[in-house]
Amino acid sequence: MTRDWSARPSANSLWEATAEPARAFPVLSGEHQADVVIIGAGFTGLSAAHHIAKSGLSSVVLEANRPGWGASGRNGGVITAKFRLSFREVDAVHGRAMAKRMYEIAHESTDMVEELVSEFGITSANLTRTGQVKAAHNETTLKAAIDEANWMTREMGDAEVRVLDKHGVRDETGSDIFVGGVLNPGSGGIHPLNYLRGLADGVARRGVPIFQESPVVKLRREQDGIVAETPQGAVRAKQAIIATNSYSDLTGATAQLQRTLIPFRSAIIATEKLPRNLAGKLMPTGRTYTETKRMMRWFRMVDNRVIFGGRGAFGKQDSELAFDALRKAMVGIFSDLADLPLAYRWSGLVGMTLDSVPHIGRLDDRTLFSMGYNGAGVAMSSLMGRYLAAFVRGETPDVGLLDARRMKSIPFYPLREPAVRMVAGWYQFLDAIGQ
């Protein structure tokens, strides 16, 4: 079913409240021409526009709402060099060469964020590369995390991964509930909306037209190219890029790709600013943190506030139950926050794929796409813009398991939401009984 693109609820997020003012972009009217028309002004689309321009080609970016309205402006701002599918699992199924290639792509993605922040001078993005701690909630998951870390050091040459004991994780988090953990120094954090707005402003200053409130309602082929039609205009181009991820069903023009994704609503809460004594106690190193439960929660400190997020907000709208569950989980880890009010609550859609990795490539000879970031998209979507530009130039970059030809459609697609609820409910039950 096509979503009403004109309904534009504003996420009650910390990012919206603290972002730099948004640049106003015009609505598309009349006819325009370019080498490439890009649908979606998130990290993927804007990075693609930047790298296409560096190739000496022209592009036009069309956004149904405003830049950053979707996942790029609603996420937790966590940057990690990983996929939902572990490198060890890749090695077991696809071999060592593929595991190493995926490892290279993952680390290239975090470097890409740093490169874009530097190139466009986006200081307000507040990019950090202080690392991430995976905190284990029992001895079984700690052993699994240590085994994974040892394998990464031995087989991938990742000598920077470090094992932490219970005291080390307590010093890191300020919480006593974890039994140990693993530190990955390559990860980091960012203000995602400022990063997005900095990209949009930088790309526009370099001459790339960006149009907001301009949903592509029809994408049709012509003899020598492709036409993207909006309610008030059209762009004729040689190629099109679809960069709409979990919001691909905003219009029928991109809805076919939605059938390759399992939409999962991710909810986030942020506290009021912590008292000075408490702010110095919790997460003093400024890293990002995840836990090892199946319904994984993550948390970080931003501007003396605790940001706490995780999966489990089902359906198309925000869920009071999901926010309540997040607050309960947060207080379970940080009991000192029991009486501290929440300042912000928001959510957004995560695009999950059947094989747990994103996909990029061609739908046909004129249409390309990249999507399905599985909850780790800030860095990966930034990198995929570079690869999309390579495809536009007629190259065939080695994208490993991300190759579009490996992408599978969701079977029994109309049943996706009840299926997600059932699986998530089972995971919550296992977490509750400590399994």
Image (tube, helix red, strand yellow):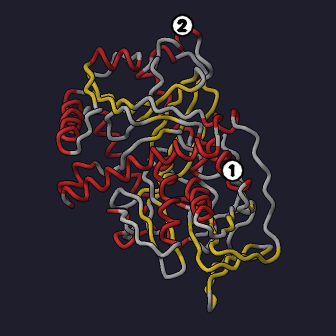
Q: Is residue 220 above or below residue 390?
A: below
Tell whether label 2 touches label 1 (CB within 8 Å): no
Categorize mark 1 by other alpha carbons within 10 Å: few (<14), some (14-19), many (20+): some
Query: Which element type, helix, strand or loop, lies under badge 2?
Result: helix
- Residue 215 spot, x, y in % from top left: 70, 67
In front: 262, or 386? Answer: 386
- Residue 96 spot, x, y in % from top left: 19, 55
Q: Residue at x 58, y 41 (%)?
A: 118
Left-right relation of 63 to 334: right
Left-right relation of 285 to 135: right
Q: CA distance from mark 1 to mark 2?
A: 39 Å
Q: Residue at x 29, y 27 (%)?
A: 181
The first of marks 1 and 2 along the sequence is: 1
Q: Is residue 126 above or below residue 399?
A: above
The amino acid type found where label 2 is placed reads: Asn
Asked where in the image residue 143 lies, by quadrant, the reply is: top left
The C terminus sits in image quarter = top left
Query: Which element type, helix, strand or loop, lies under badge 1?
Result: helix
Seen as rendered, the residue at the extreme top is 277
Q: Residue at x 43, y 62 (%)?
A: 416
Asked where in the image residue 192 lies, by quadrant, the reply is: top right
Left-right relation of 279 to 154: right
Q: Residue at x 54, y 14 (%)?
A: 279
Categorize mark 2 by other alpha carbons within 10 Å: few (<14), some (14-19), many (20+): few
Number of labelled discs? 2
In front: 416, or 213? Answer: 213
- Residue 5 spot, x, y in % from top left: 69, 63
- List the residue tagged with mark 1: 202
Q: Which mark is residue 277?
A: 2
The N terminus sits in image quarter = bottom right
The amino acid type found where label 1 is placed reads: Gly
- Residue 13 spot, x, y in % from top left: 64, 37
